[in-house]
Image (tube, grey):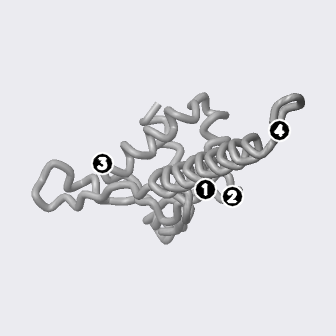
Amino acid sequence: MTIRALLRFYQKRRWIKRRQKIDFIDEPLAFTYAEAQELGIGRSRFHEIIQVLHRLGFIDIEHQGGGLMKDYSRYRISERYRKYGTPDFEHREKKKSVRHGRDIATLKRRKDKRESMARKANIVTLESDCHSRSSVTVRGEP
């Protein structure tokens, strides 16, 4: 599947024929999850393939999109793979794409804050219930 995706990247390149030579145009390429599904590659597998191709130096991530925002990623064909396994290889990690305020630490802080506020609200309710019950007199009792 990884080879199939890589070949698809190479197919998407635009080129110009000049005399007896073909020059490829270095521009960002789009390869969406929907397109990968049409090629028989599942979503999670496609995510793994992109990571492998990027880590090995076959592609570079030009723009990392976000599926919830209807934005798609754009890639560039890279020549970094030629130096793979040598000290000259330029290692790059794929960045995590997290919208501002949607990272795990922020979400956990928000959850803890909501739970803390809910506990405080319950304590206040219980205290007010206790105070209101002590002032209520039951019939027949002084």
Which mark is in front, 1 or 3?
1
| Residue placed under numbered mark 3 in the picture | 56
Distance between mark 1 and mark 3 Cα atoms: 23 Å
Q: Spatial distance from mark 4 to mark 1, Cα to Cα?
A: 62 Å
Q: Residue at x 19, y 58 (%)?
A: 89
Mark found first going from the N terminus, 4 or 2: 2
For the residue pair 114 and 142, the one nearer the viewer reads as 142
Give the image location of residue 45, x and y in percent: 49, 32
Mark pair 2, 1: CA separation: 5 Å
Circle number at residue 69: 2
Calculate the distance from the C-alpha at mark 3 to the C-alpha at mark 4: 79 Å
Whether the residues at callouts 2 and 1 have beta carbons within 8 Å, the answer is yes
Residue situated furthest bottom in the rendering:
18
Foreground disc of the pair 4, 2: 4
Give above or below for 37 relative to 55. above
Q: Position of residue 25 (x, y in %)?
A: 50, 68
- Point out which mark residue 66 bears: 1
Give the CA distance from mark 4 to mark 2.
Answer: 60 Å
Q: Is residue 72 left or right of residue 103?
A: right
